[in-house]
Image (spheres, rainbow, N blue to C red):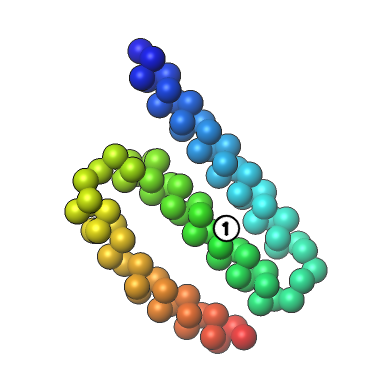
Amino acid sequence: MEKLEKAHRNYFLVWGILFVLTLAELGVAFISLPKKYIIVMLLFLAVWKALLVALYYMHLRFEPRRMWILAASPIPLIIILLIAVLAEGF
């Protein structure tokens, strides 16, 4: 029973962190900074949110190493696409 309560606490803590990061994204979107800085900050926050979701809600934190490799395999494609989008926007 204690283990279940601890798991629920972790989920609520992660949910709270995701909520705070979402509020930070909203704040960043309305800051009057150059577009380049806003894009970089939003991408940084999005990466952290994706990492939290993958680790806790997709349970990758508790999976064996080969599952991590499988989940991380699209990262080079994501980096290429982000560079292409950022290069076009700047």
In this picture, residue 75 sits left or right of residue 23: left
Percent position (x, y) of residue 11?
A: 46, 32
Amino acid type, callout 1: Leu
Percent position (x, y) of residue 35?
A: 69, 76
Percent position (x, y) of residue 20?
A: 63, 44
Residue at position x 55%, y 44% in the image: 18
Q: Quadrant location of the N terminus?
A: top left
Vertical relation: 33 (above or below) 85: above
In this picture, residue 11 sits left or right of residue 65: right
Which residue of the protein is positioned furthest toward the top in this rendering? Answer: 1
Residue at position x 42%, y 19% in the image: 5
In which image quadrant can residue 19 be found? top right
Total count of labels: 1
Vertical relation: 53 (above or below) 11: below
Which residue of the protein is positioned furthest toward the right in this rendering? Answer: 32
Vertical relation: 4 (above or below) 74: above
Residue that label 1 marks:
45
In which image quadrant can residue 3 be found? top left
Vertical relation: 15 (above or below) 85: above
In which image quadrant can residue 28 be found? bottom right
Percent position (x, y) of residue 4?
A: 37, 20
Q: Quadrant location of the C terminus?
A: bottom right
Q: How would you rate the neighbour count of disc 1 (Cα within 10 Å): few for under 14, some for 14-19, many for 20 or more?
A: some
Label 1 sits on a secondary structure element that is: helix
Residue at position x 51%, y 54% in the image: 48
